[in-house]
Image: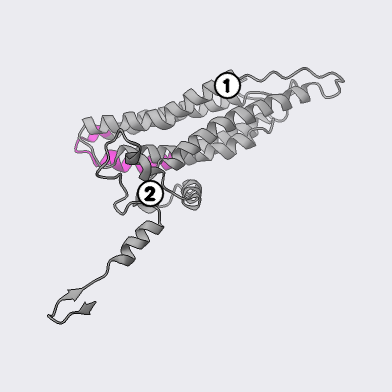
Amino acid sequence: MEEGPDGLQFQSFLGTDARATNQGYIPDGGPSRNSGFWTLEYYQPYFDVDTKLVLRRCYTTFLPFSRSYISAHLTPSVDLYGPFWTLTTLIFSLFVFSSLASSIAAYLSHPGDSSPAVIEYDFGLLSTAVALVYSYGLGVPVLLWLGLRYLGVGEWSVVEAVSVWGYAQFVWIPVALLCVIPVPLVRWILVGIAFIVSGWFLAANVYPVLASADAKPVRLIIILLAALHVGLALCLKILFFSYYAVKEIGVPDPIS
């Protein structure tokens, strides 16, 4: 603070503006007020994040027992860049590692064969992964947000909903890699771990929003979300990682 000759006081806000610029987001964490939602400038702040921030938001989803993810990690610069690439990476991981699991299973089925069977990759699995992952990771949070808006619950924005759902699917990427192991019991355990971690993470961040509604039955939506989460886990396991050698290794698969 500096005092002028007439007793006026002057204060510089340059430091505040500079800090906001260096962090790579608009100070209020939202889109530009002068841009319409149909313009690229409107969505630019949601993709203006650095790699370290995205990686931190990814691996912190492995800690579902921590405090609210939105207030602790997404505030004030909620983003769509991380969720989009998390879902997209999961799609390619499912296809690549599923194809690798198929190749390993075919090789183990004919260990001493001098002319092993030719592996034909099923590119239909790629389109299946696109439909399944994007429908769950993008469609479900948008529909949930619309439903809550209709019921008068406005505790979070659609961007926050998509961001939470997108980052919650990060755990499936390393699990897809580990499911290359051709042991049925190991694969079911890995899928179960991912199901619990991502499910608990979603419940811990979604249920407080549902509980804020005046109508108590709104909380029952968590049951529908849990059913959808079970369906996702089963689809990922059965559709992409049901390739085993002719002679099974370890405990037989309970769902052959």
The extreme bottom residue here reads 5
176 left or right of 32? right
| Region rendered in magenta | 199-218
Q: Quadrant of residue 22?
A: bottom left
Residue 47 included in the magenta stretch of the image: no
Q: Residues within 10 Å of mark 2 (few under 14, many from 20)?
A: some
Task: Check disc 1 and give the amino acid type.
Answer: Leu
* Residue 22 sits above or below residue 62 on the image: below
Q: Which one is nearer the viewer's eye here, 209 or 219?
A: 209
Three-letter residue code for mark 2: Leu
Label 2 sits on residue: 74
Residue 186 placement, left or right of 160: right
Image quadrant in which the N terminus is located:
bottom left
Numbered mark located on residue 125 in the image: 1
Residue drawn where x is 56% and y is 37% of the image: 173
Query: How dense is the environment of label 1, judged by Cα within 10 Å: few (below 14), some, or many (20 and up)?
Result: some
* Label 1 to label 2: alpha-carbon separation: 33 Å
- Residue 165, placed above or below residue 10: above
x, y percent for residue 141? 36, 33
Which residue lies at the image location 78% right of the left edge and 17% below the top edge?
Answer: 117
Q: Earlier in the sequence, mark 1 or mark 2?
A: 2
Q: Quadrant of residue 161?
A: top left
Residue lying furthest front in this view? 5
Where residue 194 sits in the image (x, y, percent)? 53, 38
